[in-house]
Amino acid sequence: MAERDYRNEVHQHLKLLAEGAITPGTAADWASTVMREGEDIDFDGLTWDGLDQLTGADLLEAPASCCTPPRISATGSAGSSGGMPDRQPTALRDVSSPVCD
């Protein structure tokens, strides 16, 4: 069985979000699911940073105002160029909080 290409999947979701092809809520739900299902996976730093950005895509900046979607650099990566794969949060975002869809 081929290994799943999480980095490419994250890149595609960031791209779709930036293009407005998926909602912030869809992006956040997808990333949260990947993080939850992949808790035993040692994601590389860029992949983890991308997942982290996507999980926060539906957070509110102010009442009824979503935060800006993550920016994609010319190289197609999101977040910092460094990585912190061992700094994974112990809890995912609170799914009961208000979301942007």
Image: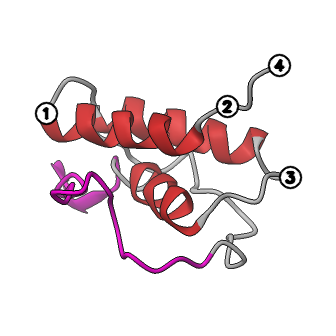
The relative height of residue 80 versus residue 67 in the rendered view (above or below) is below
Q: Which residue is mark 4?
A: 1
Q: Earlier in the sequence, mark 2 or mark 3?
A: 2
Return the residue nearer the eye: 33 or 82. Answer: 82
Query: Which of the 4 image quarters holds residue 13?
Result: top left
42 sits to left or right of 45: right
Position of residue 61 measured from the top left corner of the image (x, y, whole percent): 22, 63
Q: Amino acid at mark 2?
A: Arg
Q: Quadrant of the N terminus?
A: top right
Q: Earlier in the sequence, mark 1 or mark 4?
A: 4
In the rendering, which numbered label is found on residue 19?
Answer: 1
Q: Earlier in the sequence, mark 1 or mark 3?
A: 1
Q: Residues at badges 2 and 4 in contact (C-beta under 8 Å)?
A: no
Q: Residue at x 15, y 57 (%)?
A: 74
Q: Which residue is mark 2?
A: 4
Q: Secondary structure at mark 1?
A: helix
Q: Secondary structure at mark 4?
A: loop
The relative height of residue 25 versus residue 36 in the rendered view (above or below) is above
Q: CA distance from mark 2 to mark 3?
A: 14 Å
Q: Which residues are magenta?
A: 58-84
Q: Residues at badges 2 and 1 in contact (C-beta under 8 Å)?
A: no
| Residue 99 magenta-highlighted | no
Mark 3 residue crowding within 10 angstroms, few (<14) / some (14–19) / many (20+):
few
Q: CA distance from mark 2 to mark 4?
A: 9 Å
The relative height of residue 92 versus residue 2 in the rendered view (above or below) is below
Q: Which residue is mark 3?
A: 40
Q: Residue at x 64, y 39 (%)?
A: 34
Q: Earlier in the sequence, mark 4 or mark 3?
A: 4
